Image (cartoon, rainbow, N blue to C red):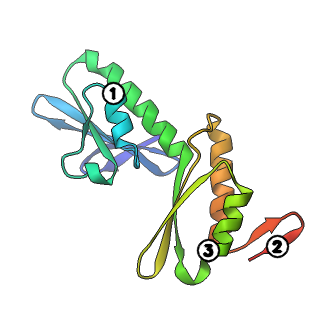
Amino acid sequence: MTRGTRFGGEAFFYRKKFFCHYHPAHGSFFLETFVWKNVNAVLGKIPGAISHPEYGAYGWVRLPISSASEIVQAKRLVEMTYRYIRTTKRISVDKDQFSDELLSLVKAKFPQIGFKSGESKKRIQIIMETPELTDFDRAEVLLNQAARALRKGKLMIGSRMVS
């Protein structure tokens, strides 16, 4: 984990991915994290956590911290966020490089990964998740392999290259 700044406050990064940040607010401070689509799961498990007033619909959670006793909740929130960042990956692919057939092949090759795709004018956004994996290193390897296949538009199946 490395430190830096983001959104006007100190921030933390995991392998260059933005992780969480905090900023002061009237005698306390807020810890804010991005948890993808898991806002409701976090709110149910972390007492005091709230959906971010402006960005909650986009996956942001805020935890107000005003006493040392709330550090336990902050630690749990950071641990949950770490899990999501290690088991979720979002990629963007040019429409001309993307095919539903390739996505189907990648899904078949990586059954441990859940795929969701959305479309904009020129690009396809794909969110990949491995929520059942507890081996984060293995999750990252699988997500990176699937992302590489989707970005390159090619997939190796056995000794055969499919594009």
Q: Secondary structure at mark 3?
A: helix
Q: Are marks 2 and 1 in contact (CB under 8 Å)?
A: no
Residue farthest toward the left in the current orientation of the protein: 26
Seen as rendered, the residue at the extreme right is 159
Q: Quadrant of the C terminus?
A: bottom right
Give the residue drawn at x 87%, y 63%: 158
Question: Which residue is rendered at x = 24% and y = 27% of the image?
Answer: 48
Residue 46 circle label: 1
Judging by the rendered image, the residue that carries numbered circle 2 is 161
Amino acid on which disc 3 is placed:
Asp
Taking depth in this image into account, of 87 and 70 the one nearest to the observer is: 87
Please, what is the three-letter code of the amino acid marked with disc 1? Answer: Ile
* Tag 3 residue: 100
On residue 153, the disc is none
Q: Can residue 152 be seen in the rendering of this structure?
A: no
Image coordinates for residue 90, horizontal then vertical, percent: 50, 59
Residue farthest to the top? 69
Outermost residue to the bottom: 96
Residue found 43% across the figure and 38% down from its top: 81
Crowding around mark 2 (Cα neighbors within 10 Å: few <14, some 14 to 19, many 20+) is few
The amino acid sitting under disc 2 is Met
